Image: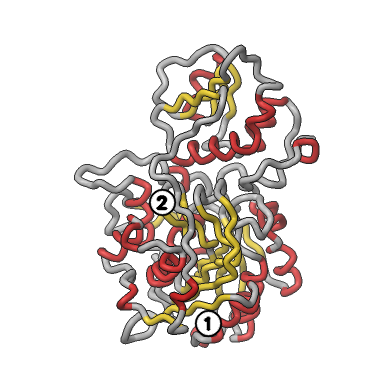
Amino acid sequence: MLSRSPFMQKTGRPEVHVTRGNGPYANTRAVLDRMDLSPAKNKRVLLKPNAGRVAPPGKGIVTDPQVVAAAMDVFKEVGAVVAVGESPIAGVHTPEAFDAAGITEVAKKRDVDLIDMDDRPAVRIDVPRGHIIDSLKVCPEVLEYDIVVSLPVMKTHMHTGVSLSIKNMKGCLWRRSKVELHMLPPVENHDEKPIDIAIADLSGVLCPHLSIIDGTVGMEGLGPSAGDAKPFDCVVAGADAFSADAVACRLMGISADTIPHLRMGGQRGYGVIDIEHISVTPEHWQDWISPFTPPPENLSIEFPNITVLDNNSCSACQSTLLLFLKRYRHILFDYIPSENNIQIAIGKGHKELPLGTLCIGNCTAEHRKQGIFVKGCPPVSSAIIHKVTGKPAVDVFDGHGETPDMDQNIK
């Protein structure tokens, strides 16, 4: 369990700082310069960006490297020992994600260590007040460093409403244990989705000591990776992660109390989400509100001549398939024989499937003889297209919502 933030004021309302219009590096320095970060002197600081996918900066998917660079510089200047760590989605290698995001380059220039937090064995921690989970497998560095800083991208999210500093801490869970949060059963007497309850539970033990929210280029609509980039040139920072997320929500045109994991965490006393009880600088910050297009209320996967057979799938597989089809559907018909429709199956509830079905994810393994089976929980897009085409796939845009040039990415 992470300790109370050393940057939190002893009394009064939580402070959150906002800056806009000067680029990612200057914006980040500006908000951090308003804070007393001296408690970090001689401490070990772990920066946790959103670099869970192989994607370039500037697309609203991964944290801008200049935001990370500014955080590195500021903490080093106060005398801290700084490192950057990540545990990406299944199928993604951390060094590749850091390289693609531009984080490797800025870290090398500053002699800052980059950590693949999946390398070492997990540490299991209890979740004493959990409503749906009672323990978590956590990457050990999260517990070993004195200070953990969450540096998410400002995004809407197709399953959790938004993805900000609290949601970003899900990337501190070890390897595939992250997927388990997407596969939980409903909770009796709870209207909220299991994933929302799980993230609220997680926030009670893994709340970051500082949040730096990167709104340089956010993502709206079908975030976290299949939405549209939204240039915003904004950075938000605060020691109360819930308050920072609440302010970011308001800037996105969203009320934090409509986001289940933030509402539940606030009700449990993990942080403050009521804007009236948060001290935000500058006073005119709400002039910068720029509403983000929300995710659709009901996620459906519909593409011409493609039938998705979804029976009891998790949100991770749904997201993966949606992104895969958005990017690669145009070449499927060159490789999968079909008179009318291509059948694609996800989920563990299928009793039988039609012959020739493309079965995606470990939950469909028992039907592998019916057609093409792609293992993974879930598999990334490059793994699916590799299985379909039979060609080694090097997808430099894993996590990107646009359609890449297949000649460049299938080798």
State which quadrant residue 71 falls in: bottom right
Residue 40's tag is 1
Residue 347 image position (x, y, % from top left) = 44, 29
Q: Residue 411 placed where, x, y %? A: 80, 35
Find out whether the residues at labels 2 and 1 contact each other: C-beta distance under 8 Å.
Answer: no
Quadrant that contains the N terminus: bottom left
Q: Nearer the viewer, residue 318 or 45?
A: 318
Foreground disc of the pair 2, 1: 2
Disc 2 marks which residue? 160
Q: Compared to 344, does 252 lie above or below?
A: below
Residue 216 visible here:
yes
Mark sitting earlier along the chain (2/1): 1
- What colour scheme governs how the chains and residues are painted in the rendered image of this protein? secondary structure
Q: Nearer the viewer, residue 78 or 186?
A: 186
* Classed neighbour count for the residue bearing mark 1: other residues with Cα under 10 Å, few (<14), some (14–19), many (≥20): many
Considering the numbered disc 2 on the image, is that residue within a helix, a strand or a loop? loop
Q: Is 132 positioned to the left or the right of 182 in the image?
A: left
Q: Can residue 147 be seen by looking at this rendering?
A: no
**Seen in the image, is 81 located left or right of residue 237?**
right
Residue 251 vs residue 118, the one in the foreground = 251
Q: Amino acid at mark 2?
A: Thr
Q: What residue is shown at x 55% (from left), y 66% (from top)?
A: 215
For residue 151, above or below residue 401:
below
Residue in the image at 65% along x and 74% along y? 23
**Hey, what amino acid is under mark 1?**
Ala
Identify the residue at horizontal 58%, vertical 82% (top origin): 30
Q: Position of residue 209 (x, y in %)?
A: 45, 73
Helix, strand or loop for disc 1: helix
Q: Position of residue 115 (x, y in %)?
A: 63, 61
Badge number at residue 332? none
